[in-house]
Image: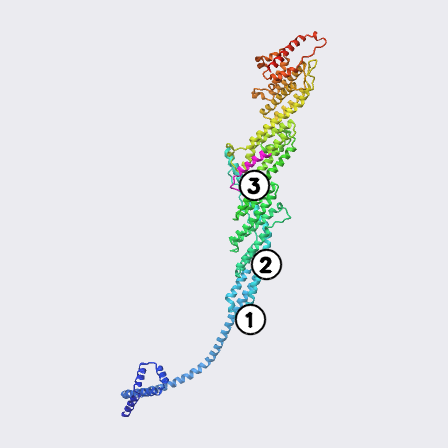
Amino acid sequence: MTAQAKKRGGAESGNGGAGLALAAFIANGEDLGPVVRHAFESGKHESLLQGFRGIVQMKEVEIEELCRVHYEEFILAVDELRGVLVDADGLKGTLSRENLRLQEVASSLLLKLDELLELYSVNKNVGDALAMLRICLQVTSLCQICNKDIAEAKFYSALKNLELIEKDFLQNIPLNLLKKAVQRQIPMVKMYIEKKVCNEFNEWLVYIRRTSKEIGKVAISQASLARQKNEGVRSQQRETEDCSRIGFDEHAYALDVELIGEEEVLEFDLTPVYRAHSVHTCLGLGEKFREYYYNNRLMQLNLDMQIPMTQPFMEYHQHFLAQVAGFFIVEDRVLRTADGLLSDSQVETMWETAISKVTSILEEQFSHMDAASQLLLVKDYVTLLGATMKKYGYQTTSLLEILEKNRDKFYQLLLSDCRKKIDGIFSKDSFEPMVIKKENEYHMNVSAFQLEPSGVVPDFPYVAPFSSSVPDACRIVRSFIEDSVNYLSYDSIMDVYDVVKRYLDKLLIEVLNDGLLNLIHGSRLEITQMVQIAGNIAILEQSCDMFLCHAAQLCFVPRRLLDKPHSGLTAKAVLKASQNAAYNGSITLANSKIDEFMLLLTSINWTPEETPEHVNDYMNEVVIYLHTLVSTAQNVFPREALYKVVCGAFSHISDSIMTVFLSDRVKRFNANAVAAIDIDLKKLEEFADDEFHNTGLSELRKETSFKDCLVEIRQLTNLLLSNQPESFMNPVIREKNFGSLDHKKVSIICDKFRDAPESLFGSLSGRSTVQSARKKSLDVLKRRLKDFS
């Protein structure tokens, strides 16, 4: 023990402080790696090893000390351990025997386990193969479906399957050969589909351009039917209002089911457009296709805007406008249903381009038109185009503006056409009373224009109070009104009635009335024709109210408004003035014809030796002519006009006879000639009295009768046949019996008056004394007249 203590003390002294430090590190369980590394790096590893040896020796000493202290307990533990060893040997033998038995049993199980593991491996391989096969089958199945969709032109479905293959299966395909084949075919299939839908779309472009014309025609015809129905409803409402002014009609408010109908849907195929758009969108080329669609349709629109130069516009305008309508109906449908293929701004741009071109073409074509019917025909179709396009939401103001701009031109052409027609009917009219032989002719020429106020169908043949030009003129005027309303119907805001009324006045005044005045003043007419013209004017003047009523009815203006003051036509007063011109023309013609007869008066014998017993031939002609004039004018003229014309004729006869007395062609005349004039006057006066009463003019209670129109020549004849002509100078007698005579005319005529020459046996005649006294009185009158002058 002393030696061991010495060793321990030497070691401890040898190690010094380094051993203590290592012992502290080990006791604390710290990592000695840094210390070892530092020792080797600094070259002091021997010292470190010496320290470790010292620590080992210290621990051995501690163990020896521990064993010495616990020796007895250790002995007991060893004894117990030996007992345990015996038990362990027994247990080991048992375990050996059991192990042998276990090995015998497990050897067969190991063989089965090897087989099971092998089966597990096969199963795993088969599962992997099945998974790979399942993926391949899904891919090939999708490819087959895609091929089938392509064959059936289900391109969108095919693209969706391709997208599914790309996203979910392409990267997971276990077979590289299949994977490469699919990767190579997908772009080719997409390209094929794109090419296919593009071809279909291009074919659709050809189809839709060809079909647009029919689409436009159907849409415009629908607009026309709608307008007709609307006009029918408004006309029925107007009739109902008119009936309500008379009395209630239970059927007036019945619902007309025939007027209610569903609008026919325009059918045209947009499938290629939808398919191409969806396919390109699915391919990520949506913007490219939208641009392609817009550019192609814009090119088609530009082609549609080019009208053929070899074909007249009147033959082509309906096709042209229908093409425009069809184009934008298609674009409206595409805008609403093609899911963003077109934008509102694009459609608006195309419409503005088209409407600008259309208005430019219309303005140019309108400027070349020379007939109102052409303008009206084009206007009607333009109006229907506007109504059709407005229904689809397009702005049509420019179309209405071009119609408004050409309104004056339309009326200029329409008035010119009416002037030609009216001049034509006047040139063909013989101006004789129209003879109507059948009832349908009566309704067509009389009842249709309310020319007979009685409304009772007369017996046939019927002699109308007007000539054939009156119903023809009424047809022209009614046609003018209808054409006017038709042209002005494009603007629902404008007061159509006032415009129609203004131009109707213009037609009646500047065309119809001027034509009548040209007949009155510029044509060589017979008196019967002039009388008939005057009667025609009277009928036309009365028809002005009918014309105005017809215009109001077409313009849906309530009839009560026509009863307001100053609501009539100015033409009515103008025609009234023309009627007076016709009366004056009748007087002029009558006087001219009378002048022809009165020329015979200068050729009679103004110094006959005997007093004639019969009326002169000229007076018979005059009476016959006056009878014809009165009978003709009586059936046509109102009584005031008849009175005016016939009085003018009688006054002219009186003036004509007086003029003959005053003219140089009568150098002298005697009492026998005056007696002949007296016989003529008595015949004329008798006729004048009879006609004044037979015509009913006596009922007018005029101060001057027909006979009174002959007063001047009657007083002159009485004066020349008077036994005391000098009584003319007596103011009282002159005022009473000769008030219409002018003393200067009497003086001239008396100077020509020579009494009958005395015959060889004249002194034996009983009249000589009377003649001598009358001659003396006449000489006194001559002298006093000269003195008076």
Secondary structure that dominates the magenta span: helix
In magenta stretch: residue 73: no
Mark 3: secondary structure: helix
Mark 3, residue position: 407
Mark 1, residue position: 177
Amino acid type, mark 2:
Asn
Amino acid type, mark 3:
Arg
Q: Which residues are magenta?
A: 487-511
Amino acid type, mark 1:
Leu
- Asked if one can make out residue 144 in the rendered structure from this viewpoint, the answer is yes
Q: CA distance from mark 3 to mark 1?
A: 79 Å
Looking at the image, tell me whether mark 3 or mark 1 is earlier in sequence order. 1
Q: Nearer the viewer, residue 245 or 747?
A: 747
Q: From this view, report whether residue 248 is shown above or below residue 104.
A: above
In magenta stretch: residue 492: yes
Q: Is residue 484 left or right of residue 45?
A: right
Mark 2, residue position: 199
**Tag 1 and tag 2, C-beta contact below 8 Å:** no
Looking at the image, tell me whether mark 3 or mark 2 is earlier in sequence order. 2
- Asked if one can make out residue 217 in the rendered structure from this viewpoint, the answer is no
Q: Nearer the viewer, residue 260 or 463?
A: 463
Q: From this view, report whether residue 692 is shown above or below residue 63.
A: above
| Residue 211 in the image, given as x and y percentages of width and height | 59, 51
Q: Is residue 52 left or right of residue 618?
A: left
Marks 1, 2: nearer the viewer? 2
Mark 2: secondary structure: helix
- Residue 667: which numbered mark, if any? none
Q: Nearer the viewer, residue 361 or 557?
A: 361
- Rendered image quadrant of residue 141: bottom right
